[in-house]
Image (cartoon, grey):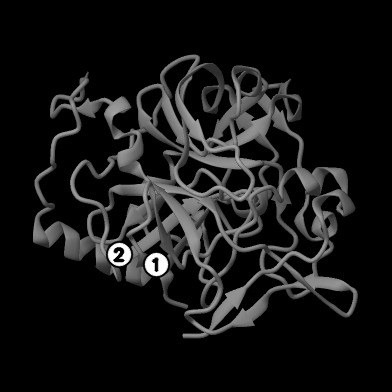
Amino acid sequence: MKKLLIALLLPASALPAAAAQKTAGDKVIYGVDDRLDYFQAAPDMRKLADSVVSLWRASEVTPAAGGFRLSTENYGESMGLCQDEPFREQPIGAFCSGSLVGPDLVMTAGHCIRSEEDCSGTKFVFGFALKSAGDAPSGAASRDVYSCKTIVKRYLNESYGALGPDFALVRLDRPAEGRQPLGINRGAGPAKGDPMFVVGHPSGLPVKVAGGATVRDPSPDGYFVANLDTYGGNSGSPVFSARTGQIEGILVRGENDFVYRDGCRVSNVVPSDGGRGEDVTKVSALAGAIPAAAANGEVVPLPAPAVAPEEPERAQALLRTLSGAMSK
């Protein structure tokens, strides 16, 4: 399968101000661009996407009749994209992604939320998605917009060029209404070659589902490397096992995004094993701070025990769903 590498040639300071905010932690597209909009994804994938949240500057989420108005820009115009780039006419606005892992707990990247001040200046918006072809979301219902109450747990090595885990666990101002917390892997981490997929907001776009990835290197301390299709804005996105549907980690860093072609920006093609790969913080780095869900729906704090393997039938069904959702 051919691979796409997205390499950013302009420094963030050379981009339009709004675009510069959305390129922090740029990533890369690997393989044919199989990113799907919400309405294109299979039902199981849409259900997972319902619990993925977009992070916005509070100043860009303002009260309006019936809820909130989201301050968005045109993706292609803001980023200087060529006319044939995917999703060029869609709106962008989010600066990072996250996932609901408890009734009022959101997991994201540590570089997305660096302090309590950052957290208080962030709005967490569920449902920023295209529900049908031609949709252009520009608002959110009150039930889908949340503020930060506090940072529960956070880690980021601030040293220049440092690798390792990068995460933040945030408590919202109230439990998320109508959203189901996602399951995390509390057992052994992924192995080389394990199939993965990611759900998030590349470049601040409405939510996308991207599959067809595998683990390249599970050995680094605190993170693993995979060839996930991600951009800036995917930082904090949950990375799922395609076998179990559980979160294996948090997308945190990787390659840059764009190259120039005739005065506009496009994706660059590389071999299937090209690029450095994308770094994913292992969920084990913060699993102990995430309560486990009991069968009756209550949440009970547990010391991260091993979880029994998924039933083979369920795992195979999920793989079939993902395969069908990702095919052209």
Query: Looking at the picture, how far across and down is residue 131, in whole percent?
Result: 54, 50
**Residue corresponding to mark 2:** 321
Vertical placement of residue 68 versus 320, above or below? above
Q: Quadrant of residue 217?
A: bottom left
Inspect the image, locate mark 2, and give the three-letter code of the amino acid beneath it: Thr
Tell me whether the residue at label 2 lies in contact with that at label 1, contact meaning CB atoms closer than 8 angstroms.
Answer: yes
- Residue ID at (38%, 56%): 220
- Spatial CA distance of label 2 from label 1 is 6 Å
- Residue ID at (86%, 53%): 15
From the viewer's side, name the closer residue of 14 and 157.
157
- Residue ID at (28%, 52%): 245
From the viewer's side, name the closer residue of 180 and 307.
307
Vertical placement of residue 92 versus 79, above or below? above
The crowd level at tag 1 (other Cα within 10 Å; few <14, some 14-19, many 20+) is many
Judge from the rendering whether residue 78 lies leftward or rightward of residue 276; answer left or right. Answer: right
Query: Looking at the picture, how far across and down is residue 28, in whole percent?
Result: 59, 65
The crowd level at tag 2 (other Cα within 10 Å; few <14, some 14-19, many 20+) is some
Vertical placement of residue 5 versus 203, above or below? below
Query: Looking at the picture, how far across and down is residue 153, in whole percent?
Result: 43, 24
- Residue ID at (34%, 42%): 283
Inspect the image, locate mark 1, and give the three-letter code of the amino acid beneath it: Ala
- Count up the numbered dots: 2
Vertical placement of residue 322 versus 31, above or below? above
Query: Looking at the picture, how far across and down is residue 229, in whole percent?
Result: 52, 65
From the viewer's side, name the closer residue of 126 and 214.
214
For the residue labelled by badge 2, is the local secondary structure a helix, a strand or a loop?
A: helix
For the residue labelled by badge 1, is the local secondary structure a helix, a strand or a loop?
A: helix
- Name the mark on residue 150: none
Judge from the rendering whether residue 291 lies leftward or rightward of residue 122; answer left or right. Answer: left
- Name the mark on residue 325: 1
